[in-house]
Image: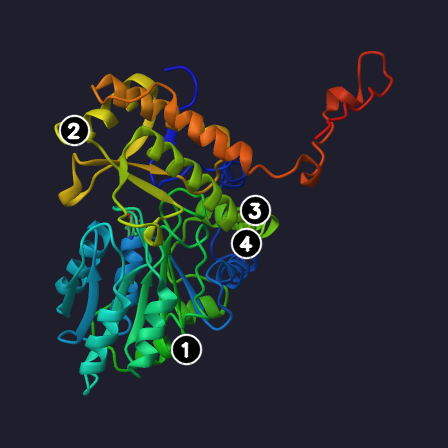
């Protein structure tokens, strides 16, 4: 099909041209004397995205799932008790992974569409007088339901219960897109993958570990080899990896971190919020509901949109893909067929999102969902227009080469734009 595919799954996300170019390079020797410059800079700078100065970063050739595993096997022992809240497919899968490692997980089941229940967590931890619970697993942004949890509140509940459990937080679809404060929230193990807010292909599983988490390694007996923090710490100390790293991904990560530093984390969070609000305006205009039950849970990186009973979201996704070249996210687990998801994270702007909303709207109408044509797109447009930055605040557009060097050889006058 001519034109670009519109990639609107909540990861992998669009990879900016700058990153594609940075990755497009010949392979090089990962044991050369030049390599430590690259590795050391990345291990230092990635921590800024987690907002930590005290955490130690680990970059595994893996994915978010590998990050889950690395965080657990380095810090606990088979038979240890963990507490976890389950409110979507990813919190469910993380629990399963822990169980496969022989960990006993006390599960707090929460309605899918809500987030981590800080009060309930606090009660359970207060009752655990012997401190048998070694860790608490929380997914910050549940990508399956489009729900963001309040990690500060969870940390507050742990502190109020004076409980020493390690706090494990999955930031796979939040780190680099939604405010994630590892140090302030005293997160012990923070996990992300490369293919979401970092705007890279999948292939890196990134974990930041607090000093308390690193100390827990001494007692942790889970078998570990590929994901052993100890091997990584020794190799990283000299600027190398214990095995062959993905060189293109590391160069891509360097470019990604440069882009994030140039844009500024706060601006990135604000952009995600504004773009997400436009999608939410469209959903309201369609007369549909989000899976997220209340505004306190709304995610700024993904919207999971419930479609009317009697229709199948898989059909919407199929038509969007085959007819309009638009990739939407599917309903996962028990939500299959009930919703589709629009990922609005990473390298995106208003017009890209309006394209996705237009495609979703057409695909929904094609499968028989009654909507006023254009209603969602119009609502999002109005939101983006109403909240647009004043033109004066924008950096001037760079003069193009053509503008500087017209055929006459004289510089062309710069066009002026009035706000
Ligand atoms: N956690 C969350 C919140 C996710 O969204 C995902 C994937 O989408 C994962 C974990 C698993 O990550 P990966 O697919 O990179 O292994």
Give residue 211's mark: 1
Labels 4 and 1: the sequence-earlier one: 1
Could you tell me if residue 27 is visible in this image?
no
Residue at the spot of label 4: 266
The residue sitting at 44% across, 31% down in the picture is 380
In which quadrant is the N terminus drawn? Answer: top left
Labels 2 and 4: the sequence-earlier one: 4
Dot 4: what SS? helix
Front of the two marks 2 and 1: 2
| Residue that extends furthest to the top in the rendered view of this protein | 407
Residue at the spot of label 2: 312
- Relative vertical location of residue 201 with respect to residue 125 in this rendering, above or below: above
Could you tell me if residue 159 is visible in this image?
yes
Front of the two marks 4 and 1: 4
Cα separation, mark 4 vs mark 3, equals 13 Å
Cα separation, mark 2 vs mark 3, equals 39 Å
Foreground of the two, 212 or 309 = 309
Question: In the picture, residue 126 is in which quadrant?
Answer: bottom left
- Relative vertical location of residue 284 with respect to residue 138 in this rendering, above or below: above
Foreground of the two, 349 or 239 = 349
């Amino acid at each position: 099909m001519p034109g670009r595919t519109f990639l609107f799954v909540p990861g992998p996300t669009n990879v900016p041209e700058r990153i594609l170019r940075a990755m497009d390079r010949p392979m090089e020797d990962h044991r050369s004397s030049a390599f430590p410059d690259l590795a050391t800079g990345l291990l230092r700078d990635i921590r800024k995205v987690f907002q930590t100065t005290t955490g130690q970063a680990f970059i595994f050739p893996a994915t978010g799932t590998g990050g889950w595993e690395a965080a657990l096997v380095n810090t606990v022992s088979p038979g240890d008790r963990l507490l976890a809240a389950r409110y979507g497919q990813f919190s469910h899968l993380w629990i399963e992974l822990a169980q496969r490692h022989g960990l006993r997980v006390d599960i707090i089941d929460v309605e899918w569409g809500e987030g981590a229940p800080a009060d309930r967590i606090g009660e359970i931890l207060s009752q655990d007088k012997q401190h048998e619970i070694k860790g608490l697993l929380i997914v910050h942004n549940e990508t399956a339901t489009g729900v963001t949890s309040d990690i500060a509140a969870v940390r507050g509940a742990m502190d109020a219960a004076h409980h020493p459990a390690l706090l494990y937080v999955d930031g796979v679809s939040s780190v680099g897109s939604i405010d994630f404060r590892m140090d302030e929230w005293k997160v012990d193990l923070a996990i992300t993958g490369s293919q979401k807010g970092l705007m890279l292909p999948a292939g890196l599983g990134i974990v930041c570990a607090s000093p308390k988490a690193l100390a827990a390694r001494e007692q942790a007996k889970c078998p570990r080899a590929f994901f052993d923090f100890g091997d990584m710490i020794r190799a990283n100390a000299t600027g190398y990896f214990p095995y062959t790293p993905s060189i293109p991904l590391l160069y891509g990560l360097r470019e990604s971190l440069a882009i994030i530093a140039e844009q500024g984390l706060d601006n990135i969070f604000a952009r995600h919020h504004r773009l997400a609000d436009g999608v939410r305006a469209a959903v309201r205009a369609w007369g549909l509901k989000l899976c997220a039950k209340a505004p306190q849970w709304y995610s700024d990186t993904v919207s999971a949109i419930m479609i009317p009973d009697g229709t199948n979201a898989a059909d919407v996704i199929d038509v969007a893909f085959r007819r309009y070249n638009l990739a939407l996210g599917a309903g996962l687990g028990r939500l299959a067929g009930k919703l589709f998801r629009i990922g609005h994270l990473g390298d995106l702007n208003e017009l890209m999102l309006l394209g996705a909303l237009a495609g979703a709207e057409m695909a929904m109408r094609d499968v028989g969902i009654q909507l006023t044509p254009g209603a969602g797109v119009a609502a999002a447009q109005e939101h983006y227009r109403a909240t647009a930055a004043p033109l004066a605040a924008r950096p001037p557009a760079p003069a193009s080469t053509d503008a500087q060097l017209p055929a006459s050889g004289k510089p062309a006058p710069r066009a002026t734009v009035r706000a």
